[in-house]
Image: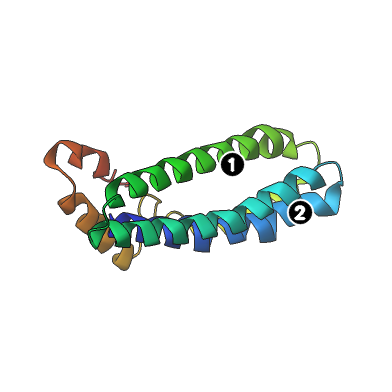
Amino acid sequence: LAAMLYYIDIFPEQFHHPKEDLHLFSALRRRTAALDHVLDALQAEHVRSDQIMRQLEKALLHYQGGAPEGLANFCANVDAYAAFTFDHMRIEEERILATASQYLTHEDWLEIDNAFRDNRDPLFGARPTEAFRMLHQRIANLVPVKLRPMFRRVDPS
């Protein structure tokens, strides 16, 4: 569980969200004010997402430390993070990505693509780093046998 939380913290929180803010969202802000309220909300959610990660880490520590309601509290935090994340992604897809082509130029898209290409998902992207490959292997080895097929990587070659 700690390795999974570490991955979630490193990739979405430290690689993905900053790229969205710096490249996609700023390009949209340069081209239109029509999406400012949605972009403001999404950027606030990026901050909130990091705060929720800290709560998840704390809940895991309490569970591992033997807190009486530790497992129930951790599970509730996981459910809340999952719901928050899926709602966030839905808004990005329905409100931002679905309308971005109305505002962004070909050059904007090239800049955005180049920025995101530099930080593909280190576990499941085309170029996983050695550290993340090892983390992926550790997570896969720690999960119950029946869940291990979910962690098999597809060879991009």
How far across and how far down the image is residue 124, in percent? 37, 49
51 is higher (above) or lower (below) than 156: below
Residue 10 percent across, percent down from the top left: 43, 62
In the picture as drawn, the residue positioned furthest to the left comes out as: 145
Reading the image, the residue beneath label 2 is 27
Q: Quadrant of the N terminus?
A: bottom left
Residue 29 versus residue 36: which sits nearer the camera? 36
Quarter of the figure with residue 90:
top right
Colour scheme used in the picture? rainbow
Residue 149 lies, in percent from the top left, at: 20, 38
Q: Residue 66 — which label?
A: none
Q: Position of residue 77 (x, y in %)?
A: 42, 47
Q: Inspect this view and state whether residue 117 appears.
A: no
Q: Which three-letter amino acid code belongs to the residue tagged 1?
A: His
Between 86 and 23, the residue placed more toward the observer is: 86
- Pick whichever, 62 or 96, lies toward us: 62
Nearer to us of marks 2 and 1 is 1
Residue occupied by mark 1: 88
- Name the residue furthest right: 33
Q: SS for tag 2? A: helix
